[in-house]
């Protein structure tokens, strides 16, 4: 099997429009959750979200790209452009069929869908749909347009596994490179879910926090008084590359992707298995593939979204896999970013990689009272980033439908 390394990264999310800004704010414990500004959310139980501030798509997109794409695709193109630029790949020096795009999206063009249907109804059901309605809506359009923008003609598609989606994309790209099916991939995920219907649907499920009077502290994984997740938007992109190919061209290598796995809970539409059986197996398989013992893992970025049931189910899974290992530290950076749904895995993978390159673990903020149900031996990085020599880092992403996905990175 060939080795796979990370040679480029890019992001746009509530904490920043670049990896550098994102990382700096994550280490500071910044949280930008506010009352929703994109529409009037005053009638919903939850009225808060982590929005991308002052998005400037023209930095990486031309006018036609902006006009003809939904926001989730704009985020994708933006972060993918950053990652490719960061990688230093000379696209003229590589066969375009050797570079693929696997790009995950959980919901697709929700804003486009709602706007077009609303206009149809307001027009007394007169067929006035935009000719770009369907292309803007499709979940695979981000992967397709990334390939068109850069002339990448290798494997190209869009996996969907709810909030596990972009970890799924990373895993697929990882495996194709290992098998010799490609030299490199632009991979990751994007999401633009802060729309009335999407937001209202999650609010109706009572899945989101109702801490409207104190938005910045609403996302509080592992805190005793957590009451739901905070919806967020944005994108994360990584260039995964075959190690010898990267080495030969003198690429800057951030870390090696050494293991990835997926399982299913086969339990409930929206709730995780209470004992974390599927999550535990995904972590065990990823560690086995990485040839890493549980005691060797230095940092685990948990999926933990700040829901009463989900956080503890995941920690129960961690306890099954790692026991009372004194080496392992965990945190949930969703306490700062909010939950980016299908983009969460890629954005958090970037933080896992940065923890290796900089030997710092970002904290879980907003913890006032640690949940007494946290299994013994699990060490949460509370409220302040911690310096630690990180050689191996893991990142989890789980999704509705019982999807569990795990990726493991190692210093190189």
Image: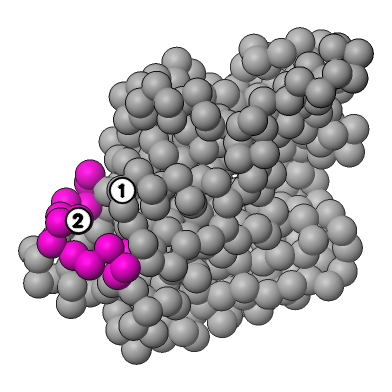
| Residue 280 is a magenta residue | no
Residue beneath disc 2:
91
Q: Give above or below for 22 relative to 268.
A: above
Q: Which mark is residue 376?
A: none
Q: Position of residue 28 (x, y in %)?
A: 39, 30
Within 10 angstroms of label 1, few (less than 14), some, or many (20 or more) residues? few
SS for dot 1: helix
- Are the residues tagged 2 and 1 within 8 Å (C-beta)? yes
Residue beneath disc 1:
150
**Considering the image in quadrants, where does the N terminus appear?**
bottom left
Q: Is residue 254 left or right of residue 128?
A: left
Which residues fall within the magenta stretch?
Answer: 85-99
Within 10 angstroms of label 2, few (less than 14), some, or many (20 or more) residues? few
SS for dot 2: helix
Q: Give above or below for 334 relative to 44.
A: below
| Nearer the observer, 360 or 288 | 288
Q: Quadrant of residue 121?
A: top right
Question: Which mark is first along the chain, 1 or 2?
Answer: 2
Whether residue 199 is visible to the viewer of this picture, yes or no, is: no
What residue lies at 89% left-to-right and 38% top-to-bottom?
A: 205
């Amino acid at each position: 099997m060939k080795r796979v390394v990370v040679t480029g990264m890019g992001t746009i999310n509530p904490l920043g429009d670049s990896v550098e800004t994102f990382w700096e704010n994550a280490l500071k414990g910044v949280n930008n959750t506010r009352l929703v500004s994109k529409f009037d959310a005053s009638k919903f139980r939850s009225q808060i979200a982590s929005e991308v501030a002052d998005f400037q798509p023209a930095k990486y997109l031309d006018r036609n790209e902006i006009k003809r794409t939904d926001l989730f695709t704009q985020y994708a193109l933006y972060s993918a452009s950053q990652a490719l630029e960061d990688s230093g790949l000379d696209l003229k020096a590589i066969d375009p069929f050797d570079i693929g795009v696997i790009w995950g999206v959980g919901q697709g063009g929700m804003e486009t869908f709602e706007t077009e249907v609303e206009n149809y109804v307001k027009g007394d059901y007169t067929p006035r749909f935009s000719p770009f309605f369907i292309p803007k809506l499709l979940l695979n359009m981000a992967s397709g347009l990334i390939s068109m923008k850069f002339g990448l003609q290798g494997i190209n598609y869009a996996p969907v596994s709810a909030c596990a989606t972009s970890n799924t994309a990373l895993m697929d790209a990882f495996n194709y490179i290992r098998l010799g099916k490609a030299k490199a991939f632009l991979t990751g995920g994007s999401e633009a879910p802060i729309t009335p219907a999407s937001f209202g649907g999650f609010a109706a499920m009572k899945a989101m926090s109702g801490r409207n009077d104190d938005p910045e502290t609403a996302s509080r994984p592992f805190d005793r008084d957590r009451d739901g997740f905070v919806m967020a938007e944005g994108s994360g992109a990584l260039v995964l590359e075959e190690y010898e190919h990267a080495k030969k061209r003198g690429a800057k290598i951030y870390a090696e992707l050494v293991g990835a796995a997926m399982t299913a809970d086969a339990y409930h539409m929206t709730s995780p298995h209470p004992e974390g059986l599927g999550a535990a197996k995904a972590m065990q398989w990823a560690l086995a593939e990485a040839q890493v013992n549980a005691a060797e893992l230095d940092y685990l970025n948990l999926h933990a979204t700040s829901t009463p049931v989900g956080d503890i189910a995941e920690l129960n899974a961690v306890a099954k896999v790692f026991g009372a290992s004194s080496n392992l530290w965990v945190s949930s950076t969703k306490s700062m970013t909010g939950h980016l749904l299908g983009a969460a895995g890629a954005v958090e993978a970037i933080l896992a990689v940065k923890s290796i390159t900089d030997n710092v673990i970002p904290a879980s903020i907003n913890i006032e009272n640690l949940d007494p149900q946290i299994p013994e031996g699990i060490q949460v990085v509370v409220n302040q980033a911690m310096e630690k020599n990180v050689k191996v880092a893991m990142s989890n992403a789980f999704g509705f439908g019982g999807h569990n996905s795990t990726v493991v990175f190692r210093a190189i």
